[in-house]
Amino acid sequence: MELDSIESMPSSDLTDEDEIHHHHLQFPSVPKPQSNNNNINNGNSVSSAIQSISVHELLECPVCTNSMYPPIHQCHNGHTLCSTCKTRVHNRCPTCRQELGDIRCLALEKVAESLELPCKYMSLGCPEIFPYYSKLKHEALCNFRPYNCPYAGSECAVVGDIPFLVAHLRDDHKVDMHSGCTFNHRYVKSNPREVENATWMLTVFHCFGQYFCLHFEAFQLGMAPVYMAFLRFMGDETEARNYSYSLEVGGNGRKLIWEGTPRSIRDSHRKVRDSHDGLIIQRNMALFFSGGDRKELKLRVTGRIWKEQQNPEGGACIPNLCS
């Protein structure tokens, strides 16, 4: 749904002869015991790493290339694949085309139990190493995993870290960017009875060194159309709890006020909306706030964001308001 109007205020070279002579000199030399132990230890570390990589390759499903977890299946010739792909290949081995049957590769499952592997988000900063069977569970909740694009106007499949997503929202989705922790928006719609399940607006605010997404949209709640505004924090849930926000809408001497904690963008836009975690305005109330003959929607939504600070004396949280 499109708005009719949106207003926003506020290198030594060696010869062959030299090289051969050099190697001859190495044979009679006996390394010191300490150095020899270091070399042995280093050799064991390299060997262990190579073995781990090799076993990890064995645990890769040849069909989906994902890591295999019990039950790991094998055909009569010893070719393995994961349980998900066993159904996809119609019980035929993708390597030799023989019937798979119900043979478990218990040896490979046991080997997997002894493995410790780094998180797949290691390149994004995660330092953790996990037993093979715990790795998958961790990765589903890893704080270093990339975020989904928070834009709600379309099903955007882009993922990345917060700086990348901020640039993506600005450059690709043309989202309005604002600095400061207070906002004042006016939403105008010429025919408020044309309510569809569509997002009206997304605005990004930068304050306290963080980014926040303000959503305002119209959708059907049961049989009645409603308007809803809510805030999402561009970061994890634990960080989001450090902030609070308020939203206010009113007119004709009446007003509605909402206060809450912003939801993390780890929670999808639809999940937040369907949980009604935000300022919800029924259409009749929205038209009343708009004044006039109630044929045009004119809503002014104001709000602010603040950071909760722990009081070192009493332990209570006190708001830190940005200037």
Image (cartoon, rainbow, N blue to C red):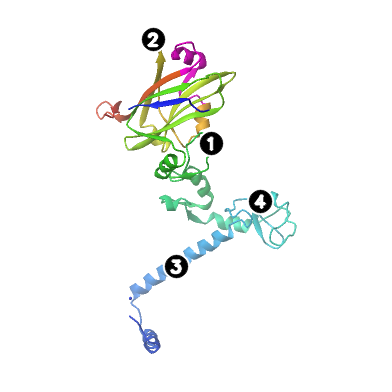
**Mark 1 to mark 4: distance in Å?**
31 Å
Q: What span is colored magenta in the figure? A: 275-297
Q: Provide the secondary structure element on which disc 1 rests.
A: loop
**The quadrant where residue 177 appears:** top left
> Between tags 2 and 3, which lies in front?
2
The residue at which mark 1 appears reads as: 154
**Mark 1 to mark 2: distance in Å?**
37 Å
In the picture, the disc for residue 253 is 2
- Mark 2: which amino acid? Gly
Q: Quadrant of the C terminus?
A: top left
- Mark 4: which amino acid? Cys
Furthest-left residue in view? 313
Residue 197 in the image: x percent, y percent? 56, 27
**Mark 2 to mark 3: distance in Å?**
78 Å
Q: Is residue 301 magenta?
A: no
Q: Is residue 256 visible?
A: no
The residue at which mark 4 appears reads as: 85
Q: Count neighbours of disc 1 (C-alpha within 10 A) and say few if under 14, some if 14 to 19, many if 20 or more.
A: few
Horizontal side of 99 relative to 40 (left or right) equals right
**The quadrant where residue 233 appears:** top left
Q: Residue at x 73, y 53 (%)?
A: 91
Mark 3 or mark 1: whose residue is earlier in sequence: 3
Q: Is residue 54 above or below residue 162?
A: below
The residue at which mark 3 appears reads as: 44
